[in-house]
Image: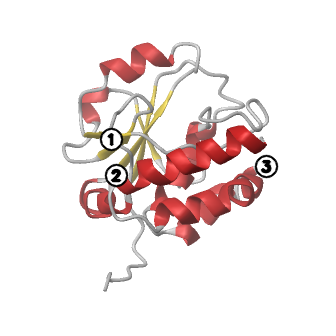
Amino acid sequence: MEQQTNEAPKILVYHANQCDPKKCTGIRLNRMSKAKIVKDMRRIPRGSIVLNPISEIALSPADKIAVMKSGLVALDCSWKQAEDIFHRVRQGEQRSLPYLLAANPINTYKPIKLSTAEAVAAAVYILGMKDIAEDIMSIFKWGPSFLTLNREWLDAYANCSTSGEVVEVQTEIMETHTRTG
């Protein structure tokens, strides 16, 4: 049986200074003491889980131990320049999030194009920390909509044990979503 913990993981945001600071969810997470900004990739802790959409390994509940020990890192950059950032990151254990829909005002209903806050909230939700995900999203007007929109999928991913299982569930979700969506 998994041990419950009320302890929140250390959440870091690598900030590439490529976005409008007024709309940046990473900066807002920092301002609201939900995450700490890091501006140098070398400051990403060894052993941390880095959310990187080009990783071939999906985030799964199996990553919770590493996150609780070394932290969770989100990459905050412009989607237009993201490819370069995603390829340069070598620190930490790279993980991609499974298929989810954005609820942020810029990419509403677009698959995969999550804001930094959405990515962090999705990750902690999948790792079994739903209350922390809800707390993170509560600081944005549209935030609770992200969890409502993706709740069924997030629950399915959170019920997996391994990255392989997450990929299997994702495949089913994508097949169903593209047929009906």
Residue 122: give x, y in percent of width and height.
54, 53
Do we see residue 20 in this rendering? yes
Identify residue for label 1. Answer: 57
* Residue 29 in the figure: left or right of residue 54: right
Residue 154: give x, y in percent of width and height.
57, 59
Could you give the CA–CA distance between mark 1 and mark 3, rounded to whole angstroms?
A: 29 Å
| Helix, strand or loop at mark 1 | loop
Task: Give the mark nearest the N terminus, 3 or 2.
Answer: 3
Residue 176: give x, y in percent of width and height.
66, 47
> Do the CB atoms of the residues marked 2 and 1 lie less than 8 Å apart?
yes
Identify residue type, mark 1: Ile
**Residue depicted at x 60% and y 49%:** 173
In the picture, the disc for residue 142 is: 3
**Quarter of image, res 136:** bottom right
For residue 19, above or below residue 25: above
What is the total number of numbered labels drawn onto the structure image? 3
- Camera-near label (1 vs 3) is 1
Identify residue type, mark 3: Trp
> Do the CB atoms of the residues marked 3 and 2 lie less than 8 Å apart?
no
Identify residue type, mark 2: Ser
Task: Give the mark nearest the N terminus, 2 or 1.
Answer: 1
| Helix, strand or loop at mark 2 | helix
